[in-house]
Image: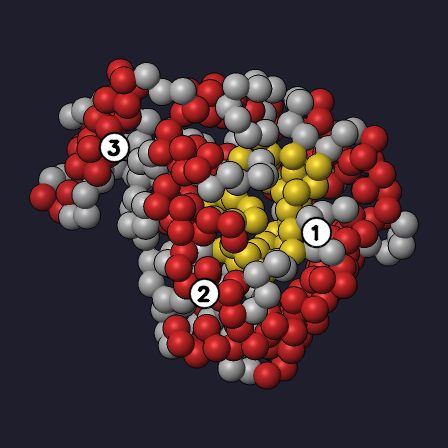
Amino acid sequence: MPDDIGFPLGMWTSLYWDLSPEDALRRLAERGWKYVDLSCEHLGELTRAEDPGRADGVRELAESLGMTLWQCHGFMDLNLASSNERTRSRSEATLAQHLRLAAELGIGTVVIHPGWVGSRARRSAKPDLVRERMTESLRRLALVAEESGVRIAVENMMKKGFGVEPADLVALAQATDPQWVGICFDTSHANASEVDSAEGIRTCGEWLFALHLSDNDGSGDQHRPPYFGTVDWPTVLGALREVRFPGPLTFEVPYLSRWPRPVREGVFGFIEVAMQHAAAPDENTRTEQQGLKDAGRDACAPGEHRSREAPRPGSAGPCLKRGPVRGFQRAP
Ligand SMILES: [Zn+2]
């Protein structure tokens, strides 16, 4: 693990969706990656575990491997803003259960998505109502967080609605309990919502509890490895240094999930080099990165394909033949 990045590196365990949480931890530790984001499916497996000692076993395993379970991902269907009171109180109960399980596992932060009103697909509806309900629910849950010693981080989401702007989440932390409620900043969601990641991180400031790092070309939520998109990684690392983020650079890259496991594991070395490069970019690198960013924006501009022959399924599209952007492919 390189030590010239300035931050330790962390990985979400869903990279090993096909392994048990215990085996996922062993594989990560073998590769020198010792900061962990326990993903939804592994948290779910431990929530449903019939063996009451399993959580203790996972905590002891992590300790024996010298690992830090920095964060975990709460269930995606939690909705603290639901108009259905039963759904909302069930979501509160599930998050309380996550916090208590996280305490047993030795996890420091539970990440959740903001709630929504109406359909999940249309998160933009009634942002003020979402804010009001999230505030009420998180005031109650902050007490459980304090009791468990586990923090709650609300993640920035995509496009429109409550929680897209990091400032929404700072206000939420301030209105609830900023010691126990903070933010998980997701670079893929920000980049696809025209929120500059470095600016967003600065806005989160001291309320930044956790990261979900990945890349995209701006056209959608693709969660690719760094430099497979248009996120400006040197400025992201610069902003993290500025706000003195105390945690790991945690990667959440489901783009890799369909790859065979040995190929997926190639991403560790790739990310190490990418982050070393981002931590100390020279002038040439900055120019190249800006060139790629401009080419990517240009190549993937909405409507680009309409004026040309439609790309064959699976092809990168005609616009990609023009510049040094072979790495760009539309998400499947
Ligand atoms: Zn995320």
Q: In which quarter of the image is the N terminus?
A: top right
Residue 209 % position (x, y): 56, 49
Residue 317 % position (x, y): 23, 34
Residue 61 % position (x, y): 82, 35
Residue 264 visible in the displayed image: no
Left or right, 143 with reference to 160? right
| Residue at 46% from the left image edge and 61% from the top image edge | 169
Residue 235 visible in the displayed image: yes
Against 231, is 148 above or below?
below
| Residue at 21% from the left image edge and 26% from the top image edge | 291
* Label 2 neighbour load within 10 Å: few <14, some 14-19, many 20+: some
Label 3 CB sits under 8 Å from any ligand 1 atom: no
Q: Marks 3/1: CA distance?
A: 36 Å
Tag 1 or tag 2, which sits nearer the N-term?
1
Q: Mark 2 points at which residue?
A: 171
* Label 1 neighbour load within 10 Å: few <14, some 14-19, many 20+: many
Q: What element carries label 1?
A: helix
